[in-house]
Image (cartoon, helix red, strand yellow):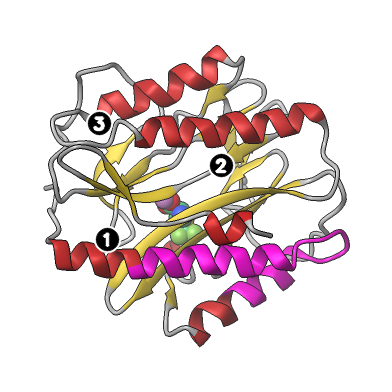
Amino acid sequence: MILLKTKEEIELIRKSALLVGSTIAEVGRHIRPGVTTAFLDKIGEQFIRDNGGIPLCKGYEGFPAALCISVNDVVVHGIPGDLFIKEGDNVSIDCVVELNGYVGDSCYTFPVGEISPEMQRLLRVTKEALYIGLSQCKAGNRVGDIGHAVQQHCEKNGYNVVRELCGHGVGFKMHESPDVPNFGVKGTGPLLKEGMVIAVEPMVCMGSKNVKFSQEDGWTCRTKDGKPAAHFEHTVAIGQSGPDILSSFEEIEKL
Ligand code: MF3
Ligand code: CO
């Protein structure tokens, strides 16, 4: 069942989603060569708690950290640990927060220092795909319109979208109905209605779309070919005439 949110509930989800954006910005301030992903996770968790939030990833189906931190060929669900960040990496910070009972979810992929032109292009196209998908988030469209738009933009640029993982409804819980795939056929899937809140999150590979999940930790999702991937995500409310993007990259992009 797809739960609809009232205007008041959407404002509360916005508060939570904006805290996610501020958290990612705070973590971003600390991303530089030589720091570990565990250190970045500590910064994020402290910031969330200092602001009255709960880091929802921590303990979710056994996930051990506050943030998912995914570097280079890790697509999503990287577990923070003793990995050292280095110049030229791409580092995605995926964060889910509950604030006053409402949930926001967002992700940003940062370049570390000077990255290759190929990687710069991957980050740019993945972020563009997110906003192109978001532009489909209006009442009367269907979930397949979002996936179709995301997939088109990525494939047109020579990239591939991951099939195993999807965006999702969000707001009362981290994961609600519907699933929001990053691929699809126009005019198919659940109807979008005013008051729906979803997370749109393209996961895009420079090489083939195939991924593998770590046998050791059960979480870390890597590209099979070892080529880099990128991930950007916003929480968005479906409006009558267009998207109301509840999370924000504004603070992140001021860095
Ligand atoms: N932000 C991710 C998502 O969109 C995080 C979920 S995985 C977790 O679903 F276990 F870390 F929570
Ligand atoms: Co999500």
Q: Amino acid at mark 2?
A: His
User: What residue is shown with label 2?
Assistant: 231
User: What residue is shown with label 1?
Assistant: 171
Residue 42 percent location from the top left of the image? 65, 76
Taken as a whole, is the magenta stretch helix, strand or loop?
Answer: helix
Assess disc 2: are there few (<14), some (14-19) or many (≥20) residues with their C-alpha within 10 Å of its C-alpha: many
Where is 126 relative to 42, above or below? Answer: above
User: What residue is shown with label 3?
Assistant: 143
Ligand 1 lies in quarter: bottom left
Q: Give the CA distance from mark 1 to mark 2.
A: 20 Å
Name the image quarter holding residue 34. Answer: bottom right
Please report the residue visible at 68 percent of the width from the left and 62 percent of the height from the top. 28
Please report the residue visible at 35 percent of the width from the left and 56 percent of the height from the top. 246
Q: Amino acid at mark 3?
A: Val
Q: Is mark 3 within 8 Å of ligand 2?
A: no
Residue 180 percent location from the top left of the image? 32, 37
- State yes or no: discs 1 and 2 in contact (Cβ < 8 Å): no
Q: Magenta part of the protein: which range?
A: 15-44
Q: Amino acid at mark 1?
A: Gly
Name the image quarter holding residue 206. Answer: top right
Given residues 119 and 255, the one toward you in this image is 255
Q: Is residue 73 left or right of residue 22?
A: right
Q: Give the CA distance from mark 3 to mark 2.
A: 19 Å
Q: Is residue 98 visible?
A: yes
Numbered disc 3: secondary structure = helix
Q: Is residue 45 left or right of residue 110?
A: left
Given residues 25 and 187, the one toward you in this image is 25
Assess disc 3: are there few (<14), some (14-19) or many (≥20) residues with their C-alpha within 10 Å of its C-alpha: many
First in sequence: mark 3 or mark 1?
Answer: 3
First in sequence: mark 3 or mark 2?
Answer: 3
